[in-house]
Structure formats: structure tokens, C-alpha cells
Amino acid sequence: MGREETSLRMEKTTGIEKITFKRQSQAKEIWRRFKKSKGAVFGLGMLTIILAVILLADVIAPYSLATRQNMSLKLAPPSWGHIFGCDGYGRDIFARVLHGGRTSLSIAVIATMTSCLLGSILGAVAGYFGKVIDSVICRALDIFMSVPDILFTMAVVVALGANFINLLVALTLAYFTNYVRLVRSQVLNLSELEYVEAARAGGASSARIIATHIIPNAMGVIIVNTTLNVAKIILYESTLSFLGLGMPPPAPEWGLMLAEARAFLRTSPHLLLFPAAAIVMSACSVNLIGDGLRDALDPHLKS
Amino acid sequence: MLENNGGILLNIEDLKVVYKTDLETVEAVNGISLTVMKGRTLGLVGETGAGKTTTALSILRLLPSTTGRIERGKIEFNGQDLLKLDENMMRVIRGNQIAMVFQDPMTSLNPVMTVGDQIAEAIELHNGKMPHEEVNRRVENILQMVGIMPQRRFEYPHQFSGGMKQRVVIAIALSCEPELLIADEPTTALDVTIQAQVLNMIKDLRDRLGTAMLLITHDLGIVAQICDDVAVMYAGEIIETGTVEDIFIGDWRHPYTAGLFNSLPDLRSQATRLKPIPGLMPDPSNLPNGCVFAPRCGNRMDICEKEHPKTVQKAQHRLSCHLYATGENPRRRDVT
């Protein structure tokens, strides 16, 4: 408390310098707190490696390797030539895991983003405005939620046909409901708080209040939920592929690879091992990062 | 209200506010009228639940939209009826011309924004085209004015103590130099030593900026310290108004106001016990027919329970009590 009394003697510094100083320090601050969590750093490292490998897939192993069949190498165990071995059609599993990751991860990330965006906006609107708008959105949501997720996605994919865009649409529609409920409950809580009232008393518009006072405070919960969902969608999408509703063969895709590996499970478990490991590792790393981010973004935990 | 520093700023007439739920109708404010003059400070005094905060929220039109409703009345600000404005015009007034300081500084700041950003937001809201350097300069100025080092603008609310947070809240409220500042028990959540500091600061800033103020409080000490005029509120009604002198040393006194004074510890008296007002405020969903204070009043007469008292006036001093119904009664020494 002693510091305030000296305020009048403080030298004035120009605002511009301070802004740049602030931006830097805030990012640094979050990074500093993020670094403290070993799990989060591990997750980030793992995800970076996975992404790097997947992005460089064409350099490491050209796409043709992932689809070229070579029956003489059918079910070949891992060797120097094919480090993950080969599958039932003699295709290189390493190349298939790499290229499959592109589809799997991009679908997971994009579907999470779109469902989060759609759900958050609807949830915020429902929670903030209440009354009729809330009722309409919630009842519409009930309709979506009354159909089991897996059935819903399957129905959409079957109706629209299995391709990249339709998979995104199906997964978004299946998952946005979570966000609506989550964000709505957060907004209901937060809009009762005095600083929201204070912002309104200061003349802030509803859109501004939602954007600067409510959403940032709900961000921790949203981020954790999002990272959990990325993992979930990776698994989900694998499930769809496993059922034959994902990307059409011969495109490499993790879930599809699991489905194909099932036939050779007893004799050649390596067919299953590598794509499964890829799924587990990416899901895990995203979760770890999510936990770390939640702690890092919360200024209360700053120490 | 003796010396008008440039006329009426806020004029509330016959304001009635109710909270309606499915089960009951709570009459929170019952036909009150009050006036805030330019550059002067009106203290709105009363117990918890008397309707002080409801009055303040009505002025800004921030009553909870599902339950609160303004039944009748007029709220004129600079001659403009606020109740007739649409939401967009109200937004221009909120924060810019009428600002509000809330009771609890712990919860009235956004925990994930730095205090500097929050002050800047308030400035930018009403000065859309102001360049960033100018906004920053104003943020630093206003922080200095409320006695906080400008460097601390990069800190988050949880890094401030309660008193410092209230300074930030006041800085936000004053950032657009409003004509009227509504302070809803600004020092209630602070401890006594900090209360004095914050009060002095409010007083100082008010004088420097010439802001008129509506100060809501239950503390008569604060009223004596910084108010020019006083309105005493009880169960949704203003039962007595006047200048500070009228209320504190005038020869008329409403029995309720007398009760408030008797509940204060007095260093000069030898009394070992305080004399609180017996009983509780009436249920606002079920108000008595006659005088609202009658059930607790030590000077109750038959008429009090039947008839609502008329307002009697002497110069600036007005009160509603049957004891003074003739307008001639001397101050009753025996009021409790």
C-alpha cells in the first residue's frame, strides 16, 4: 500500500512504449506460467513433433507410398525398409500413419473450432438475452440432443455422403450442443456479476459486454472443454471410419486403419499398434496442453 | 438546495418501482420525489431494503429486466425524461453523463482484464475516435488522480487491495467526467481507515470536477462529512428531506430519523447502551395502510395507522409525519 503515496512523484512515460511493453509481457507471462506445468510442456513438445512429422509427410514418405499395394510385402513386420511394417495390402504403415494424420487431425481441429464457435455464440446469446430467445435455442438444442451422437453423425454422413466436408458438418452438428450448454451456463453465472452490471452502468452495449467481459471470463472452461473435445473428435472420427463412414478407402486414415487391422489382430498386431498409438498420443498431448493453458490463462493463479 | 449552483440536474417525481414475481408484487419504491442540484451532493439515507439501490438503478434504467418495473413517475436529467429514452440513447448517457460506483469493489472489476484496460474501455466507449496515446494519457491521469501509481495499470484487480480496487472503480466512473455520480454505498465494503481515505478522495475529486453526486449510504457520519442535502428513505418512501443542517440540527425531526440518530454511538453522552429502533422494516410486498413507519414508531397515534401522512414543508425541509401535520408543531423532544 505504501507505493501509491509516491504516485505524484512518478515520471510520466509515453503511452506507446507502454503498450508494446505490455503486450510482450502478457504473452511472456502466460508462457512463463504455462512452462511451470511439466505435463503441459511435455504435451506441447509431443504435439509439435506430431504436427511437424505430419506436415512434412510428403518429404518423409511420399503419398504414393501410402497407397501403393505390394502383395509381396503383405503383413510384413517392421523392418528397416518399412519401419512400421506393412498392412494387409502390402502398403507402408508408416506412410499411412503420417498421411492419415493429416486427415484425422485436420478434421478434429476444424470440427472442434466450428462446433466451439457455433456453440459458444448460440450459448452466449441464449444465456445473455434469456426469455424467448433462450427458450427457442434450448428447445432446438433438445431436438439435437435427443438423437444419440453416433447415430446422428452416422445419419448425416449417410445422408450427405462420406467426404471431408460432410464429416466436418456431421461432427460439428454433433458437438456444438455441448458448447451451447456449457457457454450458456457460464454466461448465466457471469452476467449476474457486479462487473457486468458495472459495465452496463458504464454504457457498454450487450455485444461488447459479451465479448469483453463474459467470454474472456468463461474462456478457461471453454478452452479445457475444447481440448478435451479435440481428443474426443479424433476418437469419434476414427470410430466413423472404423464403421466405414469416414474417408473412403484407399485414403489413409487412422480409424480406417484400425478397422482394417482388426482382421489381422491375432497374427499381425503391428497393424493396429501404430495408428492406435498415433491416436492416443495426439489425444493425450492436446489434453495436457489444455490443462496447462487453463492454468496459465487464469490470472488468479499467477504467483 | 439553498444555493443553486446552476439549477436542477436530476429531478425525480413520483417514482414508483415494483418487482413483480409470480407469487407477489414487491413495492420497492413508492412515489418518491427528489432533486439533485448541479454541483451538489445529495445523501440518500436509509436501512437495508429501503429502496435506495432500486432508486439508483431506476435512474440508469438498469433494473433486472425480468422482474423490475417502473410503474409511474418521471426521472428528468437535464430536463430530459430518462424513462422515455430508448436503449441506445440510454447507453450514451450511462457512464458518460451519469456514472455509478457500486458497493463491492471486490466484484465490480473484471478479473481477467488489467485495470488500465478497464479504465481505457470506459473512455473509449464514449470517445470512439480518440487516438490511443490520448486514451493512455487519460488513463494515467485518472489513476494519478485517485492516488494509484500509473505503472500499476498493467496489473490485474486481484493484485489490488480492497481500498485500491474501489479507487479503480471510482477512476472508471470518473473517467468520462460525468455530470452526476451515483455512489451506492461506496465505502461499506471497506475497513474504517480506508473508508476515510476513499471518502476524502471522493470529496476532493467531486470538488475538483464539479460533479454532482447522489450518495447512497446508511452511515449518517458520511452524510455529515460530504453531503449538502439529505433524503431519508424508509420502506420505499422518502420520509424526510432537507439540507444537512435541517436534518442534523433542525428543529423538526421525523421519528424515524430521530431513531437513526439514537442508533449512533455518541462520544459525549454517558449512555452505556444504544437505542436502536425496535422492530423491523415492514414487508415491502405487504405495506401498512397508514404511515409506513407507524408499526415501529414510539410516537404512534391512532391516525398514523389509518391515514398516510401528508408532507409538511418549512423552507427546504420537508417531512411526512402526522406529528407535524399542522405545520406548527415544535420539535418533539420525546421522539424516540
Image (cartoon, coloured by chain):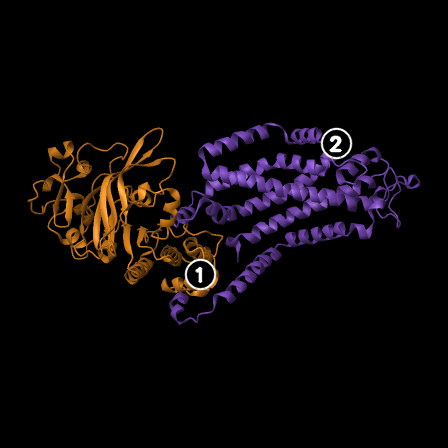
Chain colours: A purple, B orange
Protein chain holding label 2: A
Classify 10 Å Cα crowding around label 2: few (below 14), some (14-19), many (20 and above). Answer: few
Horizontal side, residue A187 vs residue A286: left or right: left
Residue beneath label 2, please?
Answer: A243
Classify 10 Å Cα crowding around label 1: few (below 14), some (14-19), many (20 and above). Answer: many
Give the amino acid at mark 1. Val
In what element is the residue under mark 2?
loop
> Residue, x 74% and y 53% (percent of image)?
A52
Protein chain holding label 1: B
In what element is the residue under mark 1?
helix
* Rendered location of residue B146, percent (x, y): 36, 62
* Nearer-the-camera pick, A70 or A88: A70
Q: From this viewpoint, is residue B254 visible?
A: no
* Rendered location of residue B334, percent (x, y): 10, 45
> Residue, x 27% and y 46% (percent of image)?
B76
* Nearer-the-camera pick, A95 or A281: A95
Residue beneath label 1, please?
Answer: B135
